[in-house]
Every structure is written in structure tokens, then in C-alpha cells.
Image (spheres, grey):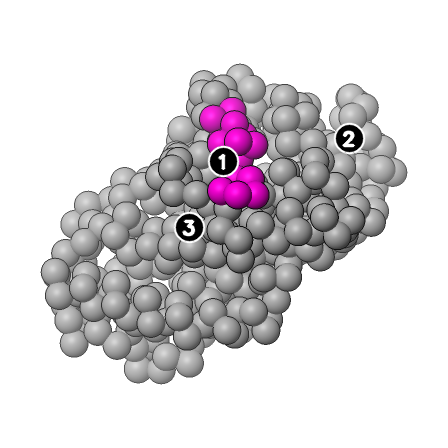
Amino acid sequence: MTTHAPPTNAPISDLDLHDDLALLDPYPRFKELRDLGGAVWMERYGMFALSRYADVRAALGTWETFSSAAGVTFNERMNETLKGITLHTDPPEHQQMRGVLRRPLSAKSLRELEGELNDEAEVVVARLVDAGRFDAVADLARHLPVAVVAKYVGLPPDGRENMLKWAAASFDCFGPLDKARTLAGFPVVAEEIEYLNTEAVPGKLSPDGWGQKLFDAVEAGEISKAQCLLMLNDYVNPSLDTTIHGTSSGVWLFAKHPDQWDLVREDPSLIPNAVNEVIRIESPITGFTRVLTSDYEVDGVVMPKGSRVMMLYGSANRDDRQWPDPDLFDVRRDGVAKQIGWGFGEHACVGMGLARLEMRAVFGALAKRVRRFEIVNLERDLNMVLRGLKRLDVTVQPL
């Protein structure tokens, strides 16, 4: 990456997007960036930020200019650590790896999973509603994602209990290196790498699991062994926290907006749109970065080739240039399928179809049994890239 001084006409900001106040509530700072301009020079980061919906979506759809090959995190140490993973590649290598990853996540495969996910959600929700009070993070939102990874990826039992810790630390390591939370994540990520390299291997993986199928692709000459080891990470980390945060944020939003829950209860066909609205208004990934392969102009500012650029999904999804009343939670919102909380373009989340199924299953089961959610206790999870809840104790009024 080439380092540049900002163009003389670029708006400049010294905002910190990774201190605790920003992690607790990033939206005022996102709005400040959007109001400053389309492309803002972030002085403390030495990179540009795109915060408006149209600009972020256009950039995500132009991988040739906004390259992922030099990494997508906010620091070079993690970019180097993850060099070669699917997230840090461009086509044609990216398409090759993504094609192998997508096989168990195809529309046909997901249709075969849907019934099982719905049945599992019904069992879990019935038990929790009978209890009357539960933690919507630990007891509800984590259940399906963890069960899917454990069963279908086929990881060996020993060490699997650390998956959530590893996933959270991995995303913490995406942050700036001047933050203690970022640095604390690296030893934890090293544990995960050691586990994947020594335990997630043929003979220990389930023979019919998604993990083993990656090694089968190595034998077939479709991917290299080095790629295979890196791609195992794609089935573990991204598939957990993003879905967990989306589901628990949904419960929180429905508890705050009972009128919206009434709409979903009375018309469950709204659930797919409601899932998109949850992801729009509480994007579980706040943003990644890219590196420019050529000069690129936004709002009159020419960002030079070699510049690193923030893509702020959480800001774009609250941009009033795209969304009327963007801070309003509205399960009937028109056009919300265009939200970019799971990314867009070449690097759109490979598992978003599975995440949607899991969230729909949970909210579908809840809609049959719960009249109201009441928040008892809430604790937000502070993470450098993820946005979500650490704990959400609720009581429910059953139907």
C-alpha cells in the first residue's frame, strides 16, 4: 500500500471509530462523516472513509478498483496474518475458492437444511418460552449457528467449545494496532490457527462434513492445501457472530418496538423483510477496508492509487440519502433487500443465505408463541468490527 497525503480538497476528520464510545454507539460519528463529504480523509488512520450508501455500494461492486488482495482489516499485521484467505483475494483466485466454499451453501443445499433448522428452532423456542425468561444471546441466538458449525462443518469435539471466543478475537484483530482490544486478540487467534492446523484435519474431521470436503477439493486439484487450511476459517468465524448478533439484535429491536412485532406476528410473511431491516439498522459488520488499484473520484475528491479506503457498512445502511427515516425500525420498509450489512458484489458474505434461514427460523418460531418481549438486562458486546449484544435478558408474554 502506498501512503499519501490527502488531496487538498478532501474533507479531513480526526474521528476515532474504535474507542469504546464509538463501539457502543457509532451512529453519531457515522452521520458526521456522511455530512462531511463522500470521501473523507481519516487523519488518525491514514486512510479514506466512504460512509454514504451509494458510494459504498458502488465501491463494493468494483473489485477491480477496490482490491481485497492486500487485506481488508484496519492494520497491516492482521492483513499479513490472513494473507490468502478468501476475504483477502481478488478474482480469479477468489472465484475459485468461493466456488468450492459455496457448494454446501447453494440454494439447493439450503432448501434441504431449511426443514431441519425450522424444527430445531421450534424446539429451542418452545423450551425458552416455557421458562418465561432467558438470555436472547446465549440461550437463543447462539443455538442454531453453533449447532450448524459443529454438525455440518464437522469439527472434532475437542476444542469446539472455543469457537465463539476465537471468532470474536478474530474480528477484534481487524482493528487499529493502537487499541488494546486489537492486540489482545492476536494470541487468541494463534490458538485457533493451531487448532485448525492440528485438529481440523482428515481423520479428525467428520468424513461427510464441509471441512472434509475442502480436503477432498485439494485431492481433486481444485484448490491447494494452503488454501484449504485458510478456507476452513471461512466456515467457522464469519458464520457465528454475524448471525448471532443479527438474531439477538432483532429480539432487542422487537422488544423496543412492539408495534413492529405485532405486524410480524399477524403476518409472518413479513419475516424475510424484517430480517433485512434488522441487518440494515443494526449491521453486524460495521465495515472493512480496501486498497485502490487506480485513482478514484468520489464527490469531487480524487483518492490516489494505493490508498486504503474504509467501507463503512453500518453508516451506509443508515444514510438518509438512501433510506427515508433511516433510524426508524420498519419491517415493511420498501427496498430494504438492498441493505449491505452482509456486503455486496464479489465479496458479499458467502453464508448470507444460511444466516437468513437461521434468523427466519428463529423469528418464525417466536412469532407463534410470543406476544411481547420485555428487556430485563442488556450488555453490549464491544468489538472492533462486529456490532451486537453480549447479553440480552428478556421475559416473554406467551400467546
The answer for how far apart the CA atoms under marks 3 and 1 are is 14 Å
Q: Taking 276 as reference, is 246 above or below it? A: above
The residue depicted at 38 percent of the width and 37 percent of the height is: 158
The residue depicted at 40 percent of the width and 29 percent of the height is: 20
Callout in the foreground (3, 1) = 1
Q: Which mark is residue 199?
A: 1
**Amino acid at pointer 3:** Ala
Around disc 2, counting alpha carbons within 10 Å, would you say few (fewer than 14), some (14 to 19), or many (20 or more)?
A: many
Q: Which residue is mark 3?
A: 150
Callout in the foreground (2, 3) = 3
Q: Taking 50 as reference, is 210 above or below it? A: below
**Amino acid at pointer 1:** Glu
Q: What x and y, as percent, mark residue 23?
A: 43, 35
Q: What x and y, as percent, mark residue 180?
A: 45, 18
Residue extending furthest toward the left: 131
Q: Which mark is residue 307?
A: 2
- 52 vs 273, left or right, is right
